[in-house]
Each structure stands twice: as structure tokens, then as C-alpha cells.
Amino acid sequence: MSDTSSTSPKRAAVIINPAKPVDIDVRGLMAKHSENNGWGEPIWLETTKDDPGVGQAKEALEQGADIVIAAGGDGTVRCVAEVLAGTGIPMGLLPLGTGNLLARNLGMDVTDVEGAMVGALTGWERKIDVVRAVRNDPDKEQVFLVMAGVGYDATIMADTNEDLKDKVGWLAYVDAGIRNLPGKPVKATIIVDGKDVVHRGVRSVMVGNCGKVQGNLEIFPDAKVDDGLLDVVVLAPKGKLGWFSVIAGMIGKGKGQDTSVEYFQGKSVEITLEHNDDYQLDGDHEGEGKHVVMTMDPEALTIRMAAN
């Protein structure tokens, strides 16, 4: 945390997504709680379509922010974390998005935005893992905190109706999921910690840092945000009734003999597809790709939040 003196109070930078509709006075409440807790006037930085948070987080650090608060959804959180990871500067969360998946996995009450403000200013700190994802087509390194995926799950993110999402929230993903159930598998080679574990046709490969996703569905039952491990789920339905086997396999946590669902854990995973397919990070569609290496960066990010 930055050095401060009695004549220079600590300052919070708030990176806010102006596209997220809110029914409370976020700026007014943040100013009030900052003053009440001895903090200086907050620094306000708005995200844009062209820059959803990375540039603003860098500016917050340049301005000497003692904490950087991501006010938006998981996309905003991910972009801010990309800059803060490894710096030691804590991140706060104001859950204003549809999923707010990191906040939920951390046990935050996502309906209590004001409580989240106070927690960011006065709460306790914990370190969580960050996953670094590197693609070579195009050459790009990004981070994620909740989950990433190639194939079917990323297609859902790409095809979700934004107007419907504003109206019904996470149920919009269900709509996209049903519409995209038909589809062809892509041949994939998956290497976990240097060991070739899958080499066949799959519909989706998901890599998780947290357990729960939209609708409180627990896709990665053994995942913990601070265990230093990646959790990998491979979905490969076979035939017309294949998705029923996938559901059964997920309920049984992949412990049966059916390879419709397989689970792996490790510190790194390399995914190579026969051809380009959809790719997503923390619910944001990031285009298409056919090769990505994901590596665990243990306890790289500090979160400040209210005790729960």
C-alpha cells in the first residue's frame, strides 16, 4: 500500500462502467464513506468500449491510489486485476454487473453495494490466485479470475442477447445455451502440467479459478480461489442424447467411466484446437483462437472486502 502522511489522506480510485444501470447514488455514497473513514476525495475513472478498465487502472496507479475499486461486472473486475496483479495494491469490488461471479465466490452480498464500499475502505485483505492466459493467435496475454473457456461455453457468451440480459439477468445465458446446443465437436489436445490428458473431439474446455458460475451453478466443485490450482472441465457429448450424459457426469463430478465429462487439476494447461473456436475470459467473448496456455499465478492479487 502506498505511503501516506497525516496531511495526505489515503485515496481510493473507483473505476466504474457507466453502462451499468444503478439505482443508487454511487458517487455520493462513495464520497460520504470516504470522508467518514478518513479517506480523501475518491478518484473517478470511467471505462469505455475501447478501454474497459486496463488503461484506467494504470492511471489510478500513476495517481497514487491506495486502493483501486472495480465498480461494474466481471469484465471490469478482470481488466482492473490485470493491472493490479503482482503490485500489492489492493482491489475492492462494487458488484454492479449481471453475474458478479468473483464477488459471489468470495462470499460477498452482491445486493449490498454500500456495504461493499465500506468493506473496500476498511475491511480485511486476502490474497487470491490469478490465472495468466497467453494466446499466440493473436499474440496476447490476459488474466482471468473466475473462468475461461473455448468452444460451446464461449459461444454462449458470444451469442447472449444483451437486451435480454438486462431484463432477466443470467437467464439470458440459458437462452443462448439452448440455441447453441446443436454443434460439431472440435479435435482438441489438452496438456495439464506437461502431461497429455485429452486428444479427441470435444465441445467445450473450461478452466476455472472459482467454483460457481451463472445461476449459482457449481461447475468446478473442487475449485478454490486461493489453492494455487487450475480446475479443468472437458465436455464431449456423444450422439443425440449426449448432453444428458454431460449433465449426469457433472452431477457425479466426473467420477464415472463415461468420458462425456472429465475433470483435471494442475498449475498449467495448454489447449490446442484443430481449428479456431470461440474463446472467453470471465464471461467476456474475446474472439476466436485455437491455442492458449493458462498458468496459475498464486496469490498474486490482494482483495479488500468486508469480513463474512
Image: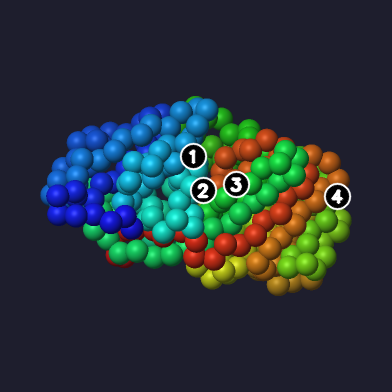
The secondary element bearing badge 4 is classed as strand
Which numbered disc flags the more N-terminal residue, 3 or 1?
1
Residue drawn 19% across and 55% down?
Answer: 5
Label 3 CA crowd tier, 10 Å (few <14, some 14–19, many 20+): some
Contact flag, marks 2 and 3 (Cβ < 8 Å): yes
Q: Which mark is residue 82?
A: 2
The answer to the question of whether label 1 and label 2 lie on touching residues, with beta carbons closer than 8 A, is: yes
Of mark 4 and mark 3, the one earlier in the sequence is 3
The x and y percentages for residue 68 are: 36, 47
| Residue count near mark 4 (Cα–Cα under 10 Å), binned few <14, some 14–19, many ≥20 | some
Within 10 Å of the Cα at label 1, are there few (<14), some (14-19), or many (20+) other Cα atoms? Answer: many
Residue that numbered label 1 is attached to: 54
Q: Position of residue 304 (x, y in %)?
A: 34, 58
If you read the primary sequence from the N terminus, does the residue marked by circle 1 or circle 2 appear first? 1
Q: Secondary structure at mark 1?
A: helix
Between marks 1 and 4 in the image, the one whose residue lies nearer the viewer: 1
Mark 1: amino acid: Val
Query: Which amino acid type is shown beneath numbered disc 4?
Result: Lys
Residue marked by disc 3: 142
Q: Which residue is label 4 attached to?
A: 187
Q: Nearer the viewer, residue 86 or 116?
A: 86
Q: Is residue 72 visible?
A: no
The alpha-carbon separation of the residues under discs 2 and 4 comes to: 31 Å
Dot 2 amino acid type? Glu
Which label sits in the foreground, 4 or 3? 3
Quadrant of res 119: bottom left
Residue 222 is situated, as x and y percent measured from the top left of the image, at 58, 69
Q: Reading the chain from its start, which is encountered first: label 2 or label 3? A: 2
